Amino acid sequence: MWGYTIRMKRSKFYRFFPPPQFLQMPAVGLDISDVSMRFAELVEKRKGFVLGRFGERAIPRGVIEGGEVKKPTELRAIFADIKKAYNLEFVSVSLPEEKAYLFDLRLPVMKYSDIRGSIDLALEEHVPLKADEAIFDYDIVKEDESSITVSVSVVARSLVDGYLEAFSGSGITPLAFEVEAHSIARSIVPAGDKNTFMTVDFGRTRTGIAIVTEGAVQFTSTVLVGGGSLTDIIAKKLKVSYDEAEKMKHDKGISGNSTNDDISLGLMSMISILRDEISKHQTYWQEHPDDYGKKRAPIQKIYLCGGDSNLSGFSGYLASGLTVPVELANTMVNINTLDEYIPEISFNDSLRYATAFGLALRRPK
Ligand SMILES: Nc1ncnc2c1ncn2[C@@H]1O[C@H](COP(=O)(O)OP(=O)(O)OP(=O)(O)O)[C@@H](O)[C@H]1O
Ligand SMILES: [Mg+2]
C-alpha cells in the first residue's frame, strides 16, 4: 500500500491467527494502551477512505500494566461493551513497542515463501526468547540481486496470549496484531515518502519514539513521561484533584500564567526529560552507521501525535532545544484522500487516533 516496489508488507503476526479467508478482510483498528482503548474504522471508497465507526473507552488501572494483560476477565468485559455499543466484529490490534524487539536481517535471495522460515531459524541469535516462545512479523526493507533485507519485530507469545484470552468470548475477533510504532508510521508518514522521520507519540503514561526510514520502522524506544505526568505535577503543586488538574492543563497549557510560574517550570522540566531522550536518539542515529557500515539518512522532521501533543506551548518548548523541525502530525494524511470529504473528528481528537487509524489503514496484501 506504500506504493514501493522494494518493500512488501506482510500480514501481521498472522501465524497465530484465524483462517486465511479472514485475513482478506479489512478490520477496525483497535489501539489498546494501559489506560484506554480507542478504535476507528475506515471505509474504503473509490477514491479514498471515509471514517466509519470510532470511539474510545477508559481502562481501569491494573487491568493492563506495561502492555501486559493482568486481568483478562475485566478486559473481556470492556471488549464486550464496545461490541454491544458499536457492533464491532473484526479488529487489528496494536501491541506496545516497549515489549517488542526489533532487528534487521540480511538474507540471501530466496523465494518470499521461504523468508519466514529463515527468520525463524535466526530468531534466537537476535532476541532473548526461544523461537517457540516468540511471535514475529517482518517487512522487506531492501532487495538487490544478492540479498533481501528484512526488518523483524518480535514479541513474546505470552504477551499476545493475554490479549487472546481477553478477546475470547467477547464477540470481537482479532485478525492481526502489530507493534504500535508500525501503525503510527502508517498513519502519519505520508505514503510513499522515503525520507527519514522521527515519530513521537505523547500519550498519557508514556511516550513512544520511533525512527522511520523509507516507510519502515527502524528503531523504537519508550520514555515513561506522558501527558499524565504533567497533570500529576499540577495536581500536586496546587493540591487539586487529577480531574481538576487535567482541566487546568488544557486551559492554560505549558506556560500557564504569571501566578503559577513554579508549575510552568515543573512542566518544562518534565518535557525536558522527553526532549533529552529525543535528542539522544537523534544523535545516536546520525552518528552511528547501520549494520553494514553505511551512514544513516538524516532525520528530516519530528512528527508529534498523541493526546497532549497539541497542548499549548508543548511543541514549541520541545522544539526549542532540538536541531530538527518539530511538526504536529496530520494523522489523516493517508486517509483523507477525498477532496470533498470533511472528517467528523476534530484535529485535536485526531492526534489521539494515530494508532487506530494506522491499524485501520492496513490492507490485506
Ligand atoms: N479529549 C481527550 N480525551 C482524553 N485525553 C485527552 C483529551 N484531550 C487531551 N487529552 C490528553 O491526552 C493524554 C492522553 O493521551 P493519549 O490518549 O494519546 O494516551 P493513551 O494512548 O491513552 O495512553 P498511552 O499511550 O500513554 O498508553 C492525557 O494526558 C490527556 O490529558
Ligand atoms: Mg497511546
Image: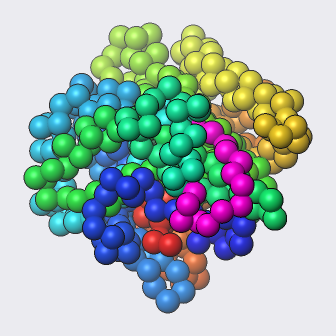
Against 248, residue 329 (above or below) is below
Q: Position of residue 295 (x, y in %)?
A: 89, 40
Which residue is more in the foreground, 273 or 223? 223
Against 42, residue 18 (above or below) is above
Q: Residue at x 44, y 37 (%)?
A: 131
Against 43, residue 90 (above or below) is above
Which of the 4 image quadrants contains residue 261? top right
| Span highlighted in magenta in the image | 102-115
Instruction: Look at the image and say whether residue 112 sits in the magenta stretch.
Output: yes
Which residue is more in the foreground, 187 or 109? 109
Q: Is residue 97 visible?
A: no
Instruction: Look at the image and say whether residue 296 sits in the magenta stretch.
Output: no
Q: Is residue 76 visible?
A: yes
Q: Position of residue 151 (x, y in %)?
A: 63, 48
Q: Residue at x 38, y 55 (%)?
A: 15
Which of the 4 image quadrants contains residue 299? top right
